[in-house]
Amino acid sequence: MTAPKLLKDIALSMLDLVAVREGMSVGDALAIALRTAQHVERLSFTRYWLAEHHNMSGIASSATAVLVGHIAGGTQSIRVGSGGVMLPNHAPLVVAEAFGTLAELYPGRIDLGLGRAPGTDGLTMRALRRDRVETEADFPRDVAELQALLGTPQPGQRLVANPGANTHVPIWLLGSSLFSARLAAQKGLPYAFASHFAPGMLLEALDLYRSEFKPSDVLAKPYAIVGVPVIAAPTDDEANFLASSVFQRVLGILTGKRGLLQPPISGFWEQVPAQAREAIQDFLAVAVIGGPDKVQADLNKIAHATQADEFMFVCDVYDPALRLRSLDLVTQAMRA
């Protein structure tokens, strides 16, 4: 029987959607992201990932590779990467050249996380890659092409990414279902589950990934990241108040009314209809919200249930200073 995972043994990382806040600009959002990355670097976080989304007024991370370079340039040692690049939106050669360039600029610090979903609506998807029709076979084939382009060129290889070749940028597969879990296991790649927004199949996907894992040149045994939304404060009441910004955002996603990250509202949860509250709770089933004791207890539960190698936190607190405080408290809970 596997021993329970101890919080102190779990690596800490962060995923940033680079939220644009009500009353602030896109430039403000980018500056907040850099300050947050610098802060968690001081907290000894392992990596800082940015997520690709398009045509969404409240998210400023659409040019993911550009933002990865900006964050890497403003930090010293933390790994920076995509969480992820949505591969259906891009030709593998373009991704290889972009991340190969980043790897040459910041050696040993760049990650390439790949997602299978387009990450946007049909209209935007067509604008990105026109009328290309995706099939289930495309993603595994594109991943294999990326591995070849970022690896050592083979004799007679006619298509070579330059930059890109010989950089061996680590590739991670991301998912919220079983498809990428199985592919990551077959290829012997590290795997990250998007439980920060789609926790339903978390345990099943991790079980599948670990049971079917085949060692590879890049990974000898399974390595899994679990996405965890977190909001910590000195008290449970304050944490729940701050979390109302996230509740508003999730309600907007569920009702098709996406917008900017809103300030917290007292009593917001009580104003939400019961059916909507249930949907928000399902969306945030893995969320950790509370004071130090509750945060530590909830993180322990997730660690024991998932046996995660790494937690990747999502922390959407409206006030940037209170966001940093939240990350401080979560780190203290993990390392106590």
Image: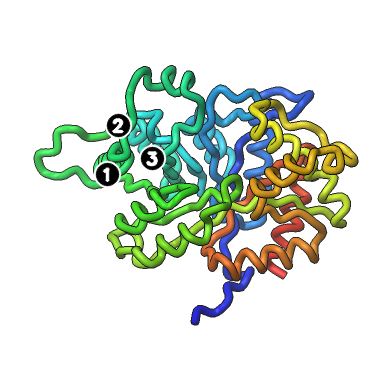
Mark 1 crowdedness (10 Å alpha carbons): few <14, some 14-19, many ≥20? few
Q: Which residue is mark 2?
A: 93
Could one spot residue 217 in this view of the protein? yes
Element type at mark 1: helix
Q: Nearer the viewer, mark 3 or mark 2?
A: 2
Q: Please tell me which residue lies in front, 299 or 169.
A: 299
Element type at mark 3: helix
Q: Amino acid at mark 2?
A: Leu
Question: Above or below — where is 88 with respect to 333?
Answer: above
Q: Residue at x 37, y 18 (%)?
A: 130
Q: Position of residue 270 (x, y in %)?
A: 86, 42
Mark 2 crowdedness (10 Å alpha carbons): few <14, some 14-19, many ≥20? some
Q: Mark 1 touching mark 2, by CB under 8 A?
A: no
Question: Above or below — where is 160 with respect to 77?
Answer: above
Q: Nearer the viewer, mark 1 or mark 2?
A: 1
N-terminal label among 1 and 3: 3
Q: Disc 1 versus disc 2: distance between alpha carbons? A: 12 Å
Q: Residue at x 64, y 31 (%)?
A: 30
Q: Please tell me which residue lies in front, 40 or 298.
A: 298
Q: Position of residue 121 (x, y in %)?
A: 51, 25
Question: Above or below — where is 312 with respect to 124?
Answer: below
Q: Which residue is mark 3?
A: 104
Task: Name the mark on residue 144.
Answer: 1
